Image (spheres, grey):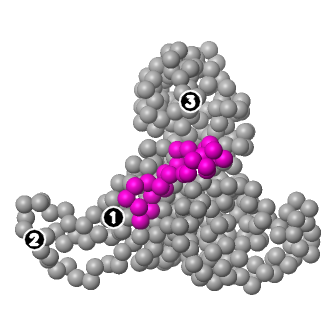
Amino acid sequence: MPTTLLEAVPAAQLARRRSAARRSGRGAAAHNGDAVFEGARSHTPVLATELLEVLAPRAGQTAVDCTFGDGGHARLVAERLGAGGTLIAIDRDPLAEERFAALALQAPCAMRFIRSGYAEALDLLGEEGIEADMAYFDLGMSSMQVDTRERGFSYSYDAPLDMRMDPSQPLSAREIVGEWDERHLEQALRDFGEERHARAIAREIVARRLRGPIETTQELVETINAALPAPARFGAGHPAKRSFQALRIAVNDELGQLDLALPRAWSILREQGVLAAISFHSLEDRRVKRFLADRARGCICPPELPICVCGREPEAELISRRSVVPTPAEVDSNPRAASARLRAARRLPVAGSGAKEER
């Protein structure tokens, strides 16, 4: 997919845009005076306070929001970057681009949007020589995508079976459910959804589509229910939750994107820059945890050697040894936050010498 760029907007130009917006009436009525920037406050991002604590954005810095979504985290970061700062937002969803355009009218810092998968966008930023003070991910699907029923992300609404974060890409959940063979369906359900009943569900999907295509989320939910034993249908959580997660990950290559994006995000950080990621299931969290732990690891010599001969120095300092989780109060007010986990690390200065040290 071609990358779409909205170039950085200087602070003076932003001021002129705000003034023009007020004169044209766009700041009135629905946005009431403070216009779109204030309107964006209706979205409450997950672990917002905790993310700001680890990022510690300051005036004049450069931040890269790798998963802009509804713009909740970006708005909070932009407020702290000020007129001399820059926020670069990345997302492949055209709805996110619309939200960005609204936010950019009122954000106090320079803004830039790249419509692309985050792995490709981070690669582009690296080629441009961008150096960031922070980069962060809010992984998985956004509340905006869940709540847009016709996108087919949720098992709670009857909608066309889609699940594409980029609506222009060819592959959708409908194609996977309708065309993949039983073995590949089973593998996707097991690997991406950690679904215990992957084989039975894959078999039922193949049998069901012989009678007619599975085209809606409700038809898929019914097919999944038909494959499950009663305890699984009536246990904790929705019986289709893991299958929907698996299909969404497969459609959007989310784990492949993440594996590529983490090292690319790390590579554009300045010394003392921070990389942070909020994940919502173990498949994402394990990848983030391993990546950061590997960067924080120093000597890898066998323990029986009296001195270090590998010369490996830690690249990162973990900001928290354990993942940061939402408070009970946040989960009460926003149940979607319940599974969220935040991990972060700070990039250390490159070691000045490769001298061997006693262990």
Specify whether residue 149 is painted magenta.
no
90 to 219, vertically: above or below: below
Mark 3 is on which residue type? Gly
Q: Residue at x 50, y 29 (%)?
A: 180
Q: Mark 2: which secondary structure? A: loop
Q: Which mark is residue 295?
A: 1
Label tally: 3
| Residue at image point 71% right, 32% down | 157
Residue 275 versus residue 129: which sits nearer the camera?
275
Identify residue type, mark 1. Arg
Q: Quadrant of residue 214?
A: top right
The range drawn in magenta is 319-344
Q: Pointer 2: what residue?
A: 307
Residue 127 place in picture, x, y as percent: 48, 73
Decide which of tag 3 and tag 1 comes sooner along the chain.
Answer: 3
Q: Which mark is residue 237?
A: 3
**Residue at point 67%, 60% (across, down):** 71
Badge 2: few (under 14), some or many (20 or more) residues near its Cα, within 10 Å?
some
